[in-house]
Amino acid sequence: MKTPSRLAAVAGTLLLGTALAGAVRAQDDGQWTSPGKDNGVTRYSGLTDITAENVAQLRPTWTFSTGVLGGHEGQPLVVDDTMYVVTPYPNVLYAFDLGEEDYPLRFKYRPDVNPASLGVACCDAVNRGAAFADGKIVYNLLDGRTVAVDARSGEELWKTRVADLAAGETITMAPLIAGDRVLVGPSGGEFGIHGWLKALDLATGEVVWTARNMGPDEAVLAKPDTFKPFYDAGTELGTETWSGDSWQQGGAPVWGWLSYDPELDLVYYGTGNPGPYNADQRGGDNKWSASVLARRPGDGSLVWAYQFTPNDNWDYDATAENILTELTIGGEQRKVLVHFDKNGFAYTLDRASGEVLVAEPYVDVNWAKRIDLETGRPEVNPDKLTGKSHGMVRNICPNLEGGKSPASPASYSPKTGLFYVSTNNLCMDWQSSDAAYIRGTPYVSADVPYVPGPGGHLGAFIAWDATTGQRVWAIKEKFPVWSGSVVTAGDVAFYGTLDGWFKAANAQTGELLWKFKVGSGVVGAPITYRAPDGKQYVAVYAGIGGDWFLIAGDVRSDDPADVRPPADFAPDLARHTSQGGMLWIFAL
């Protein structure tokens, strides 16, 4: 039952949300020019042609095979009259003319990606998409380069090497463009990399600055007059919170989503797991792995940082999106950052300071009892600590795929005041052994069998109230939900499933309104846009991949030697899907 204070909080949020939604509708130009739609990565569209009342009439209007079998994560872009699609390796860029019948190719750009990167990529050779600015399409290549292409002609404008493939670094993330800076980071947490974020000059591709995620303050760009974390004090936190020199191979990759607040002039990004998985080999909090960092895009200066999972024992990467909005918390309107961490807690932070305002579990969690808002630290369950000294530890929830995968970006509607989140219901057993660091090779050493979570389902698509830390509704799914989502002013939330369904739900109530079988599991993020013909469309990739290519079993039919048994916790997933590589477009 809603208490008076809860009702007041809801009313305040909805009043603010209604005003914000009206402003978004007024300014939404129907394009999708950055990975998360806007700087705040809300994945919210102000378009209203498709509504909860008519979405059942949605029909496919166009499809395209990318020619690549693999995990199609990320999302297309729509800029003016052109749609841009980036494939998994070999990272082909397609540009489709939306102003002509049948959407013919405007151009096709084929980069020369080093095939050796396939052997280094941890968890499938995915790509999470491109960004547009200043007439350029900018995206990353698996082999560690960032490229800019002329958005009209397809001419390559610049190409810059930013990652070291020989050290185990690849790039799968979508870049963020903040002013004249292109922000990029590496994958490679399982290879013992020394994580970083780099800023490139948008005009030339030149690397302007590099900031390490751990190490000496000088390398982290943690300057005494600028760096003011809310919960931590002292200097050299990036070395003093690691045993010995373990920070040098400490991981903390940046393979997820970045956001930007132009008023505060802060870029926000999450870092991945520390290495190796055996926590006994890296005592201390291991800052700033499994953290969110706020930096100035101009010079990279670190302004604040907050660690979600100190001394991460469970591979709880914090690379998920940090959604920026304004919410009423405790009767006060706050500029917030909302983050659904792999560790199973949903966090609402003050994005100017890094203070934790709300932190509650959004899935079943037993590795920690709660988050202490006074200290910002989790109250860890000692029975769930891992490391070689702990032997086999049973039934840790959530498992290392996370309560939500960072590859599955959530969305936020200022109209409803709710966040829409793809979740997993999996737990794990864990046994660590000693890991030996050899440059450019896996640095892991853990046996981690998965087990289903409680309730008889492996995933759910949920709506979340970040002002109170409460689930509002949920659609349970047979398999983990690995897609991103998009929500619209028409009160429709779209998401996809691993068994190949693309679905639409009522954003207010959670009622399932429509579904369509797209042929392969959905691990990408849908978008919606207005085409030159004036109509609203919805687009999504179909192409199972990422971790699920490794787990699902026999889903690859083009290689007769690749017939693997399915994971025992989801033995029939391969009965419903195979690898694919399709772009689907729908309209009324």
Image (cartoon, rainbow, N blue to C red):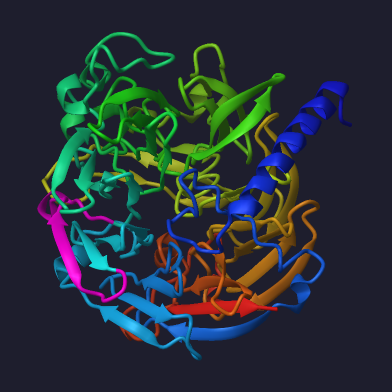
Residue 273's image quarter? top left
Q: Camera-side residue: 457 or 89?
A: 89
Q: Is residue 197 left or right of residue 529?
A: left
- What's drawn in magenta, residue-wise? 151-171
- Tell me if I can see residue 87 in this picture: yes
- Residue at the farthest bottom position: 101
Q: Is residue 404 magenta?
A: no
- Tell me if I can see residue 578 in this picture: no
Q: Camera-side residue: 180 or 325?
A: 180
Q: Is residue 319 left or right of residue 559?
A: right
Question: Which residue appears at 17% of the width and 37% of the height?
Answer: 209
Question: Which residue appears at 34% of the width and 77% of the height?
Answer: 94
Q: Is residue 107 above or below residue 207?
A: below
Residue 254's image quarter? top left
Q: Quadrant of the N terminus?
A: top right
Question: Which residue appears at 38% of the width and 60% of the height?
Answer: 128
- Residue at the farthest top position: 234
Q: Is residue 311 above or below residue 408?
A: above
Q: x%, y% of residue 124? A: 33, 64
Question: Which residue appears at 59% of the width and 58% of the height?
Answer: 486
Residue 526's image quarter? bottom right
Q: Is residue 460 above or below residue 399?
A: below
Q: Camera-side residue: 80 or 481?
A: 80
Q: x%, y% of residue 281? A: 24, 29
Q: x%, y% of residue 49? A: 71, 68
Label count reads 0
Q: Camera-side residue: 561 or 391?
A: 561
Q: Quadrant of the C terminus?
A: bottom right
